[in-house]
Each structure stands twice: as structure tokens, then as C-alpha cells.
Image: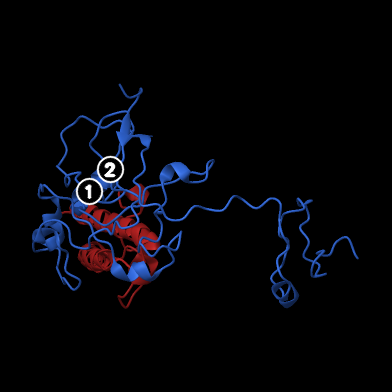
Chain colours: A red, B blue
Amino acid sequence: MCENQLLQKVYETGFALDEITLYLDTHPMDTQAMAYYQYAKKANQEAVAAYEKVYGPLLINQVNAGSWTWTANPWPWEGGM
Amino acid sequence: MNPNNNQRCGCPCRPQIPAPPCMNTDCGCSRCNAMPLPPSPCMPPQQPACNPAPPSIHLHVACQDNTPQPVPAGSGSASLQIPANTGSASQQIPSNVGSASQQIPSNVGSASHQIPVNSGNSMSGQPAFSQAMQPASAHTHTHNQTASASVSSCGCGSGNPIVPDTDLSRMPIGMGYVPWQTWGQTYPMEQGFVRGTLFPDLDLPFLMGRCR
């Protein structure tokens, strides 16, 4: 999967997570919504992990390598994200 | 008494703006709590008891986009939901809304729409949630029974914490009321991202011009 597709999956799962968060804010006792939240959270974590495995960290708190890989990928003006 | 103090308890909690004589300016201190509430000439009229008679109300529904869309669940809802695919300028709320005895069933609709609590589904497989977009004749609703323990607006024990059981036409004027969303079908994540919402019930795009 190319970078755009991996990133698209991150966006889609992240949006689903945002949506279910808003729903749960007004329906905190809804068990079905809670189940969907767990599903969306897992999907988002997997999407982020899949992207970061190939293209490096997406967030500053995801730098796990021994060196500072945050600046290793192209900058936006260099064609990166 | 210091004009800056509350007239009842003497605490320096008096509102900064002049309050009408009937306005309760108590601060909740122990002195306020110990004092009986004075009779207020400005009290609103006594709220009527829960009235199981269904309301009749017309609402304007946003115009619907006529482009083909994945079919959400049918609009045969038992809850206070305005169907998303009406296309009409005014909408009659189903007659069973607002009934004191109206309990929104917890498992309405086909079993394929049930979302397991511990699904453990991964993205790679076909999660149970994607089945939610299969066309269905009934709209799945859930009303979490634990929510029924929360305070009902009129205390009649209907279980719905927000939608009052009184006749809508007898509800206070000048206030906005929003139909309560209940859990139903969801779009697949890819489609929800494109539509701007995960919920078909909330997929109400604004169109230029007015309803015809």
C-alpha cells in the first residue's frame, strides 16, 4: 500500500474515532457505541502502526527508534507530509 | 444590610446585576439551605403531569441530496427520530412520540445489526459493523436500559432521560428542542469520511436554494 493509501486509512479511522467520541459524550452509557469505540480505536491504532512502520512516526510521541527519526523523512517543502 | 450581600443569607453573593424580586439569589450556603424558599410571584405555572397523548408538531427538514447514496436503515423508527430521507418541507413526527408508556425497544431490527460488545474485529476482516449498511426494513434502535436510571425530565419514569413525556404542544415556548439521537446504523469508515459523518441519520447535506 502506498503512502497515500496508508495515510488515508489513518484519516478514515481517525475520523470514525472522532465521531464515536462525540456520540459517546452525549450517550456515555450506550454499550453498542462503546463497542464501536473499541473497534474504531483498534482500527486507528493499526492504521497508524502500519503507516509508521513504513514511513516513520506520525506524532512526536511515536518516535521509538534509537535515533531521532522525526527529522529523517522529507519535510513538507521536500514533498513529505 | 450591606447592599452587596444577599438579602436572605447575608453572604456576599448577591448578583451584580439587579435581580427581579422573584429571582432566587440564594448561594447555596448552609444558611440559604436552612431557610425555606419564599413564595415567588414569578414562578412559572405548574407543569402539567405526564400526558401520554402523542404530540402533533411540524418540523422543517433539511432538503435531501438527490444523488444516489448507500441506503441507510429504513425510517420506520419508534423513537423521536426525524427520518433523513424525507425530502419534504414539513415532517409529522410519528404519533408514538412523547408517550408516557413509550419505551424505546432495546433490540429492534434484524439480528445482523446487533453490534457485539466485545467484537475484537480487525480492519482486515469484515467487521460486524459493516453489516450495518445492509438495507433493512426496520431501523435498529437501542435504548440502553441503564440510562433509564438517570433522571427523567418529568419524573414519570419513562426511562428516556431527555425526551419529555409531556405533550410537545404544552412544553415551554421560546426554547429549542433537539430530537435525541439513538444508536443505529453506521457508515463504513471510508464512506463516513467522505460523507462527513459516521451516522446516516446525520447525513443531511445542505443544498443551495430552498425546499420545494
Using the image, name the chain to which the residue with label 1 belongs. B
Using the image, name the chain to which the residue with label 2 belongs. B
Mark 1 nearby-residue class (10 Å; few <14, some 14–19, many ≥20):
some
Res. A78 visible in picture: yes
Residue at the image point whose x is 29% and y is 68% from the top: B145
**Image quarter in which the C terminus of chain B is found:** top left
The disc, 1 or 2, on the residue closer to the chain's N-terminal end is: 1
Q: Where is residue B19 shown, x and y percent of the image? A: 76, 52
Residue A80 shown left or right of residue B153 in the figure: left
Circles 1 and 2, Cβ within 8 Å, touching? The answer is: yes
Q: Where is residue B199 shown, x and y percent of the image? A: 26, 50
B69 or B185, nearer to the observer: B185
Residue under numbered circle 2? B94
Res. A1 visible in picture: no
Residue under numbered circle 1? B77
Number of marks in picture: 2
Judged from the image, the secondary structure of the residue bearing numbered disc 2 is loop
A73 or B87, nearer to the observer: B87
Against B66, is A50 above or below? Answer: below
Residue B141 shown left or right of residue B171 in the figure: left
Kind of residue at badge 1 = Ser
Residue at the image point whose x is 17% and y is 64% from the top: B115
A49 or A67, nearer to the observer: A49
Q: Where is residue B150 shown, x and y percent of the image? A: 41, 68
Against B149, is B177 above or below? Answer: above
Which of the two discs, 1 and 2, sits closer to the camera?
Answer: 2
Kind of residue at badge 2 = Pro
The CA span between labels 1 and 2 is 8 Å
> Residues at marks 1 and 2, common chain?
yes
Residue at the image point whose x is 35% and y is 23% from the top: B210
